[in-house]
Image: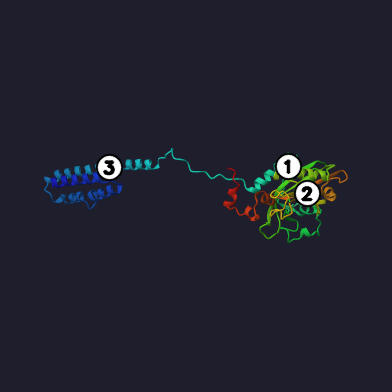
């Protein structure tokens, strides 16, 4: 019996030595020390031994069991240490590896154009003004000489919330509000960039939401020649020093006289090409002298004050500058389009 137990111990110790995972070690523990294991079996059979043998064998069994237990605990600790070491080794960082490239964003082309236009006009003494995108009928239409029956006020053309409240159709209400705040005292010299909304079906050249920049200069003795000089300086800074402007008569309810402003074509230098539809000129702005009724409605004495105003579509400027053929590119956020405006 003694030799048998000694053999059992040696066998167990060898298996403990060979166990390379905690799972294998657990299997060894169950097979030797578990309820169905040989040690338990020997203990169960102790009753059959003689009174002299029982304490001697009992002692040997205890020693064998304790030795196996102790060896298993030591091995368990060792395996745990090895596990931690392996985990640390697998998680170590090689600081000499090159870093992952970081995706750097770029300004949206419309933001870039707005900032360029702002810079040009700030250089000419203008300030930037802003106002609400949800407007009341009075500032969006009435104060701009668009009376109640005017066709531009058709419910079909604008997004109305109520009879009095709508999404602004132009940034002009910002100018009307600013003039009112000046309480009849000039100068007012502002540009107003912002979103505007019209009930249009979207296509390559129309969007129900787009960006406008409008400008207003009201003071004593402001003339049409001032308007022409300011727009000429702007166009030369924005499009290039070699570009010319020309004014053509037009009509807007809020300006009188009103003009359309063309810029000489930068591609063919006035010779005629695809871009300028073979005219040598490209229409980019609307403008005019502020209608006396508009001045009066916002609290300015039209016998003392005069002013000029102008407006331009930001998408159109960006499309001309970057030769973009579809306005919807600005709003669909396709990375292949946007990534082209990265400055490297
Ligand atoms: C006040 C008085 C006058 C703003 C003006 C235009 C001419 C114009 C269009 C250009 C293309 C809008 O984006 S677009 O569709 N704008 O042609 N805008 S004069 O005149 C004003 C504004 C405010 C108080």
Q: Is residue 302 left or right of residue 44?
A: right
User: How packed is label 3: few (under 14 Cα within 10 Å), some, or many (20 or more)?
Assistant: some
Q: Is residue 151 above or below residue 35?
A: below
**Earlier along the polypeptide chain: callout 2 or callout 1?**
1
Residue located 32% across and 41% down the image: 82
Residue located 19% across and 42% down the image: 63
Pointer 2 residue = 246
**Earlier along the polypeptide chain: callout 2 or callout 3?**
3
Asked whether mark 1 lies closer than 8 Å to ligand 1, one says no
User: How packed is label 1: few (under 14 Cα within 10 Å), some, or many (20 or more)?
Assistant: many
In this view, the residue farthest toward the top is: 96
Comparing 46 with 273, the one in front is: 273
Asked whether disc 3 touches disc 1, contact meaning CB atoms under 8 Å apart, the reply is no
Comparing 341 with 166, the one in front is: 341
Q: Is residue 220 left or right of residue 194?
A: right
Percent of width and height locating residue 46: 16, 49
Asked which secondary structure carries label 3, the reply is helix
Quadrant location of residue 146?
Answer: bottom right
Pointer 3 residue = 75
In this view, the residue farthest toward the front is: 271
**Disc marking residue 121:** 1
Comparing 42 with 13, the one in front is: 13
Residue 194 seen by the camera: yes
In this view, the residue farthest toward the right is: 303
């Amino acid at each position: 019996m003694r030799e048998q137990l000694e053999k059992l111990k040696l066998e167990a110790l060898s298996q403990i030595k060979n166990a390379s995972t905690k799972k294998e070690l657990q299997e060894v523990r169950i097979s030797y020390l578990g309820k169905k294991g040989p040690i338990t079996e020997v203990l169960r059979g102790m009753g059959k031994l003689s009174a002299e043998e029982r304490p001697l064998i009992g002692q040997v069994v205890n020693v064998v069991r304790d030795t196996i237990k102790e060896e298993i605990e030591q091995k368990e600790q060792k395996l745990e240490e090895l596990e931690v070491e392996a985990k640390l080794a697998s998680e170590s960082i090689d600081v000499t590896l090159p870093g992952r490239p970081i995706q750097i964003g770029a300004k949206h082309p419309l933001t870039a154009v707005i900032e360029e236009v702002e810079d040009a006009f700030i250089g000419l003494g203008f300030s930037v003004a802003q106002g609400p995108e949800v407007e009341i009928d009075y500032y969006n239409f009435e104060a701009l000489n668009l009376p109640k029956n005017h066709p531009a006020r058709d419910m079909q053309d604008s997004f109305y919330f109520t009879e009095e409240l709508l999404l602004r159709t132009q940034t002009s209400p910002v100018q009307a509000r600013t003039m009112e705040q000046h309480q009849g005292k000039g100068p007012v010299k502002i540009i107003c960039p912002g979103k505007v909304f019209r009930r249009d079906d979207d296509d390559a050249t129309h969007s129900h939401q787009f960006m406008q920049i409008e400008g207003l200069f009201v003071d004593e003795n402001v003339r049409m020649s001032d308007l022409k000089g300011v727009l000429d300086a702007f166009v030369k800074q924005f499009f290039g020093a070699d570009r010319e402007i020309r004014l053509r008569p037009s009509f807007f309810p809020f300006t009188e006289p009103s003009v359309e402003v063309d810029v000489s074509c930068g591609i063919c230098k006035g010779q005629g090409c695809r871009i300028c539809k073979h005219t040598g000129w490209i229409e980019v702005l609307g403008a005019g002298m502020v209608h006396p009724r508009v001045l009066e409605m916002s609290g300015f004495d039209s016998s003392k004050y005069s002013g000029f105003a102008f407006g331009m579509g930001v998408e159109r400027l960006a499309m001309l500058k970057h030769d973009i053929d579809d306005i919807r590119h600005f709003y669909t956020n396709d990375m292949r389009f946007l990534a082209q405006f990265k400055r490297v």
